[in-house]
Image (tube, helix red, strand yellow):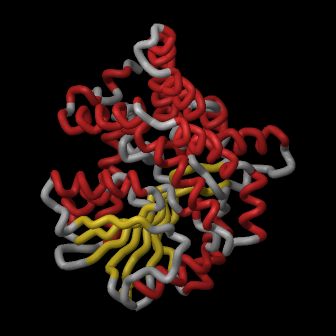
């Protein structure tokens, strides 16, 4: 399918163009120390690191720092790569752009949260605040966002100011593992996250905190990793595909439905919805498109760096970020798991 059938180029959107140019500027002048911290952060996505967290769930400070170092660069790479919201949505409508499917997903999310004007909603892992802005525009609810990366929080608050919703959308630097949150019991109408739960070192503790701050009948929505029974941890090829998918997608933990269910049961949260809403249960067409887009971008950057029109570190950063696209495609096509399992749970009345 032709690229132009998939997405509107960012350079035709004034706001996205400005955001992409700001990110390019940040990357252009990225210090050598910052570059190295980004490259060093990749060991946090190893299978060994996941095992270490399983043994010591309280020890999340170093993990938080490394994840922050990774996102402090990746958020800019995504902004110039047509995925400023930094997530690949479920494929809800075939032949439509990633951005279009993001909007469809966020509309579904907003409906399932069942919130409105006067309510407060918490977003865990709010990124640049673009999803929060859309959820606010759909529901009228006030959004509080937490994120571990201060560069994204700065962008989120700046975006809210420019859109004149900074009184309703407020963002703070905070690790989702750092509980309790500065929120009163029963003060939140709903909580949602997109791609952040894999950074949780203790699901039970997190969901206990969500239960505390939610009002009765309040809901928690997740869009995140879910490993399927087809994945065999004794199969070297399955392990390779997961190992190579993790750093590309920013997956810290490879969670199975049983992991979620145990934590929900412990915290007294009732499952309302659990599904992979993508057409045919696959995201492959969107992954392939984005992989192709970034591969083209990498070739262009490589040429420009050889001509010394761009600094060499841009090619290094982009190469590191785009590694293992084929593994991600094979992981999804093989139905070993998904990064877009949609789960909604509810606090009892």
Residue 331 figure quarter: top right
Q: Residue furthest left?
A: 164
Residue drawn at the location 45% of the way across and 36% of the way down: 30
x then y, percent, for residue 175 = 50, 67
Q: Is residue 101 visible?
A: yes
Please determine whether, in this image, residue 18 is positioned above or below residue 52. above
The C terminus - image quarter: bottom left
- The residue that appears at 36% across and 67% down in the rendered structure is 172
Q: Is residue 346 left or right of residue 247?
A: left
Q: Nearer the viewer, residue 340 or 146?
A: 146
Q: Looking at the rendering, which quadrant does residue 215 occupy?
A: bottom left
Q: Is residue 288 left or right of residue 152?
A: right
Image vertical order of residue 63 relative to residue 202, above or below: above
Looking at the rendered image, the quarter that the N terminus falls into is top left
x and y percent of residue 191 in the render? 39, 72
Q: Nearer the viewer, residue 74 or 118?
A: 74
241 relative position to 303: left or right: right
Q: Is residue 238 left or right of residue 196?
A: right
Q: Is residue 8 visible?
A: no
Residue at left offset 45%, top offset 56%: 149
Q: Position of residue 39 (x, y in %)?
A: 61, 39
Residue lying at 51% horizontally and 75% vertically, measured from the top left: 271
């Amino acid at each position: 399918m032709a690229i132009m059938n998939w997405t509107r180029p960012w350079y035709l959107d004034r706001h996205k163009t400005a955001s992409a140019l700001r990110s390019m500027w940040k990357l252009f002048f990225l210090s050598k120390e910052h570059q190295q911290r980004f490259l060093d952060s990749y060991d946090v996505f190893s299978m060994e690191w996941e095992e270490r967290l399983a043994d010591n769930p309280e020890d999340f400070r170093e993990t938080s720092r490394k994840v922050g170092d990774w996102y402090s660069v990746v958020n800019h790479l995504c902004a110039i790569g047509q995925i400023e919201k930094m997530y690949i949505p479920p494929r809800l409508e075939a032949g439509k752009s990633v951005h279009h499917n993001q909007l469809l997903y966020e509309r579904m999310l907003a409906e399932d949260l069942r919130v409105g004007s006067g309510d407060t909603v918490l977003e865990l892992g709010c990124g640049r605040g673009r999803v929060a802005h859309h959820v606010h525009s759909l529901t009228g609810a006030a959004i509080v966002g937490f994120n571990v990366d201060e560069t994204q929080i700065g962008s989120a608050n700046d975006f809210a100011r420019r859109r004149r919703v900074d009184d309703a959308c407020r963002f703070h630097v905070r690790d989702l593992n750092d509980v309790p949150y500065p929120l009163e019991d029963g003060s939140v109408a709903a909580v949602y996250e997109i791609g952040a739960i894999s950074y949780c070192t203790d699901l039970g503790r997190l969901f206990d905190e969500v239960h505390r701050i939610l009002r009765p009948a309040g809901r928690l929505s997740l869009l995140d990793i879910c490993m399927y029974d087809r994945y065999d941890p004794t199969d070297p090829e399955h392990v390779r595909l997961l190992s190579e998918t993790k750093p590309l997608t920013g997956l810290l933990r490879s969670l199975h439905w049983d992991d979620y269910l145990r934590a929900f049961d412990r915290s007294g949260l009732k499952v309302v919805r659990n599904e992979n809403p993508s057409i045919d249960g696959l995201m492959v067409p969107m992954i392939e498109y984005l992989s192709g887009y970034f591969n083209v971008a990498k070739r262009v950057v490589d040429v420009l760096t050889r001509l010394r029109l761009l600094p060499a570190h841009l090619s290094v950063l982009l190469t590191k970020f785009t590694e293992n696209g084929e593994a991600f495609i094979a992981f999804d096509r093989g139905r070993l798991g998904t990064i877009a399992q949609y789960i909604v749970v509810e606090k009892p009345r």
